[in-house]
Image (cartoon, helix red, strand yellow):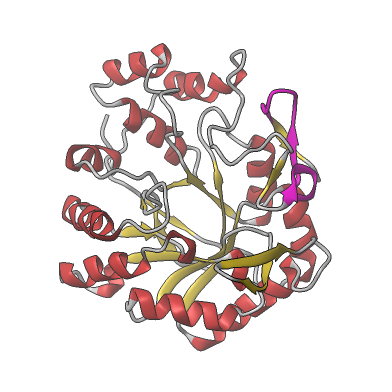
Amino acid sequence: MSASAPHFEFNNGTKIPAIGLGCWMGAVGGGQRVYDMCEKALKAGYRHFDTAAGYGNEKQVGEAIRASGIPREEIYITTKLANSDHHRVREAFESSLKELDCEYIDLYLMHWPQASISEGETGNASFTRVLKSDESPTIIDTYKEMEKLLETGKVKSIGVSNFSIKTLSQLLPHVKVIPVTNQIEMHPCLPNEDLKTFCDEKGILLTAYSPLGRSATFFEHPLVNSIAVKNNTTAAQVLLSWGVQRKTIVVPKSENEDRLKANITPITLSSEDFQAIDDIHKEPGMHKSLLKYHTASKSVFGWTYEELGWNFSVGGVVSSKTTA
């Protein structure tokens, strides 16, 4: 059964399309490919675009949106603060706004809790240092600067990304404005149930990046394919519909016109099919991250899993629990 893509309401009363276009191209930049992808997406009906300063393609996203002729108020734009800019939030925000050239930004996220600073250059090499969680600017310092951006009227909402129960618990007692969302890796192999319960209780919606994973894990899964066949739809639509039905925002990425059209058209899964997808992570070896940034040293961008609040078992399989 087909359903129109819904909007979700944030804790500040603003609304966001539940399905957006993720603009990370697998590497920094993307140039004309990004413009073309956004152009196709706009024609397919997308009105929610998710980019970041670190993606290196805010300019192309903004150009495609302006060229579409679609009124600005009908478009939802998310971008993110880079780790290297935690000490200069206002300047980084203004730079993103200039690159996008879109009047205002709907949602501005702290991309990661880790802050890094430049420690100079030697020859052609530059050196950066990742700050520890208690070094300034801390996540609290950075978020307080983000709160000040709301006073400018140039951004409608603020939030975070890649936060756990641990990092949210460190942040929330000190904020005036509760984040509207926490954007994390989330799909049937990594449903983050404990984190979702925590965020639901705080009024924070979750946004799923990589909602289709980054491998053939789901597209070769017999259960996912059987549900797709039964519903006369695609495996991707099944996965995205599961995400939307659990009241999470999803931002899949595709450059293919047919897949773009399919991805933005969710179906209503039966309770039986929904539960079947919900249980995939319980299969042997299936509860795991599908991303490539995990390292043997159990660290990501300079912070250990413990600092990030992530619990990992042997072999890199992710526990559904996050350290409080």
Above or below, 59 relative to 193? below
Q: Is residue 124 magenta?
A: no
Q: Is residue 102 left or right of residue 249?
A: left
Residue 83 location, x and y as percent?
61, 64
Q: Is residue 113 left or right of residue 71?
A: right
Above or below, 298 relative to 176? above
Q: Is residue 308 magenta?
A: yes
Determine the image quadrant of residue 134.
bottom right
Name the residue rendered at 50%, 45% in the picture.
208
Residue 304 location, x and y as percent?
76, 46
Q: Is residue 176 visible?
A: no
Name the residue rendered at 53%, 77% in the picture.
92
Above or below, 27 relative to 226? below
Q: Hey, which residue is sitting farthest right in the picture?
A: 134
Which quarter shows the N terminus?
Answer: top left
Q: Which residues, given as a range, are shown in magenta?
A: 303-318
Name the residue rendered at 17%, 70% in the picture.
67
